[in-house]
Amino acid sequence: MPLKTLPTSARPREKLLALGPAALSDPELLALLLRTGRQGKGVLQLAQELIDRFGGMAGLLHTPARALESIKGVGPAKRAEVSAVLELARRALAQQLRARQVFESPDTVMQYVQLHLAAKPHEVFAVLFLDAQHRLLAMEELFRGTLTQTSVYPREVVLRALHHQAAAVVLAHNHPSGTVQPSRADEALTQTLKSALGLIDVRVLDHVIVGGGQSLSMAESGLM
């Protein structure tokens, strides 16, 4: 159904201006970015098609722009806009984490990690390096693949912490399966890195695990 045939109050733009963005569904929000559909398919239908194809909004926003090339009706401009929204969200969260102590806003940390790692098809291990006030200095993806004590090298993590002159770190990785429950290997790896980083007086504040739409803080869960 074309947007112009909808009642004014039901059109995404007017609805957002009247009620705020939280009042819109995922397809309605995405339709505002896409603006137009294609022949035989309105913009709301196209938005729903993209959401279904790529596993929800999180999956869509983490999809490389080139992966959208196969979708009829999604040209370069629309692909660029979807990618830009994700990058804006990353930068906004990073700015917050650089401006204040990380654990003044633990939810922001999890959102930041989610945006970077949640929709990746393989396991990725990342480290957030923090200054003495526990503000973000940098986030680096250091390892890929199945995470074990043998695939994540403590020496490399230590070297990167020294490079950034970090006082503390937050460890993070994703579970492509969607579950965020830490495995025994995750717990063992956390302890190994705590010991290695402790030798250079760098604290491990947390280990965040993210999956599809959810996250877990090992520190808050008493697993550290």
Image: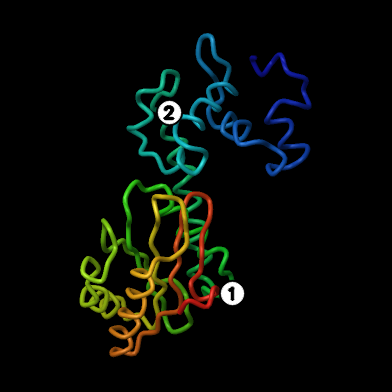
Check disc 1 and report the residue beneath it.
104
Name the residue rendered at 39%, 66% in the picture: 183
Whether the residues at callouts 2 and 1 have beta carbons within 8 Å, the answer is no
Q: Nearer the viewer, residue 167 or 196?
A: 196
- Residue 22 in the figure: left or right of residue 52: right
Q: Colour scheme in the image?
A: rainbow
- Disc ID at residue 77: 2
Report helix, strand or loop for mark 2: helix
Which amino acid, by three-letter code, is at mark 2?
A: Ala
Q: In the orientation shown, which residue stands out farthest toward the top?
A: 40
Q: Which numbered marker is on residue 153?
A: none
Q: Of 182 and 174, which appears nearest the observer?
A: 182
Determine crowd level at label 1: few under 14, some 14-19, many 20+ residues with C-alpha closer than 10 A.
few
- For the residues marked 2 and 1, what is the alpha-carbon distance in whole angstroms? 38 Å
Query: In the visual, does 215 lie left or right of 70?
Result: right
Of the numbered discs 2 and 1, the one sitting upstream in the chain is 2
Image position of 35 (left or right of 1) = left
Q: Is residue 45 left or right of residue 23?
A: left
Q: Is residue 108 above or below residue 156?
A: above
Nearer-the-camera pick, 21 or 184: 184
